[in-house]
Image: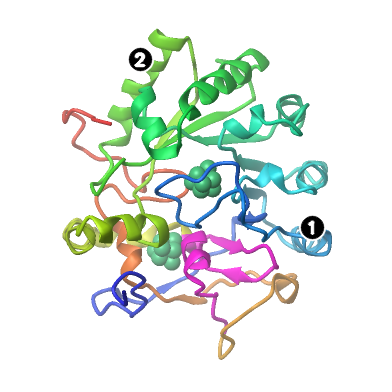
Amino acid sequence: MAELFSIHPVADFPTVDRLSLEVLQVNLGYRCNQQCIHCHVNAGPERPEMMEKPAIDQVIDFLRSSPIRQLDLTGGAPELNLHFRYLVRVAREMNIDVMDRCNLTILEESGQEGLYEFLAQHQVEIISSLPCYLRENVDFQRGDGVFDRSVRALKKLNQLGYGQKGSDLTLNLVYNPLGAFLPPPQKVLEEEYRRELGQRHGIVFNHLYTITNMPIHRFALRLTSKEEYQSYMYLLRKAHQETHLQSIMCRTLISVDWQGYVYDCDFNQALGLPLRLGERSSVHLSELRGMDLKGNPIPLLDHCYGCTAGQGSSCTGVLRESSDHKSKATT
Ligand code: SF4
Ligand code: SF4
């Protein structure tokens, strides 16, 4: 099992330092209405961890003290947090761009009435996973019935103006592979999604982000159960591109957990590897008011190959578009 969550520094990664902060990513809790097989935070309906109001207010305090202009809300399903709408409202009043990592089906859950309209009214950017444009593949990864509910949600978002030409309501989709392979070229797959979702369902969207599956938690367990963990790690290492180290997302982003503790990224949060500051091995967001973290070193570990392999990967897709635009994208 030790190999599963390998956290040993990797010799061939050079030291990488932080740039100025641009994005605050906040995990509002691990509860989710879904239980996807690739989920790197092991989210699900039974998870009790949810950010409470005092920690939400610390997030707001930090934003007030910082030049950060982007707030990236994730979970679990971030909308399940009772203070989600409060946080969005305050951040938007501060003119901060808010991204909601929305799993789409949450929009259709009871108790979430008015959520579509709320997101549109506050011009929240929506980033939604849709690992394929085919029902069977989506339902395989995300659960029975998820595809049909996702399509219903996407159509309603389109009706509100999301993803439409000339609209300022942004709808981006996320693809991640269904198995132990790297994503196909992002641009190619985006065109394929646009064509297929348009022709089959009349759905429009702004961009498709391709994201590499991280070899951690639920996905790592699945790889191990199929005896594919070692070969997947080999694939990632073999496809490592040194140049991506310049643009890995942890250089400009910090990730905050439901209790307000800070990590270099969401993946490190999932692994329980906090941001290090000098001799400190654990830092709370409330201690970083007014700080930028520029120059702070980022320890890179085995799972970081998930960010540097192939086209590179981040929460907003590839780090560099692949030149291989001729290869056929497959989902
Ligand atoms: S991948 Fe997203 S939608 Fe699926 S269980 Fe995890 S947090 Fe929920
Ligand atoms: S997993 Fe990616 S984003 Fe996180 S520390 Fe490693 S390289 Fe940076």
Q: Amino acid at mark 2?
A: Arg
Q: Residue at x 45, y 11 (%)?
A: 201
Q: Is residue 190 visible?
A: no
Image coordinates of residue 37 in percent, x first then y, are 40, 47
Q: Quadrant of residue 289?
A: bottom right
Residue 117 lies left or right of residue 43; in this view the side is right
At label 2, counting other C-alpha atoms closer than 10 Å, the crowd grade (few under 14, some 14-19, many 20 or more) is some
Does ligand 1 reach within 8 Å of label 1's beta carbon? no
Residue 307 lies left or right of residue 249; in this view the side is left
Indicate whether residue 171 is drawn in magenta. no
Q: Amino acid at mark 1?
A: Ile
Q: Which residues are magenta?
A: 250-277
Q: Quadrant of residue 261?
A: bottom right
Question: Is residue 324 positioned above or below 7 on the image?
Answer: above
Residue 111 lies left or right of residue 16; in this view the side is right
Q: How is the image coloured?
A: rainbow
Question: Which secondary structure, mark 2?
Answer: helix
What residue is pinned by disc 1?
A: 60
Q: Residue at x 42, y 51 (%)?
A: 314
Nearest the viewer among 57 and 91 is 57
Image coordinates of residue 45 in percent, x first then y, are 61, 48
Upstream in sequence: badge 2 or badge 1 = 1
Image coordinates of residue 268 in percent, x first then y, are 48, 67
Q: Quadrant of residue 100?
A: top right
Question: Is residue 145 positioned above or below 234 on the image?
Answer: above
Image coordinates of residue 104 in percent, x first then y, are 57, 31
What residue is pinned by disc 2?
A: 195
Q: Quadrant of the C terminus?
A: top left
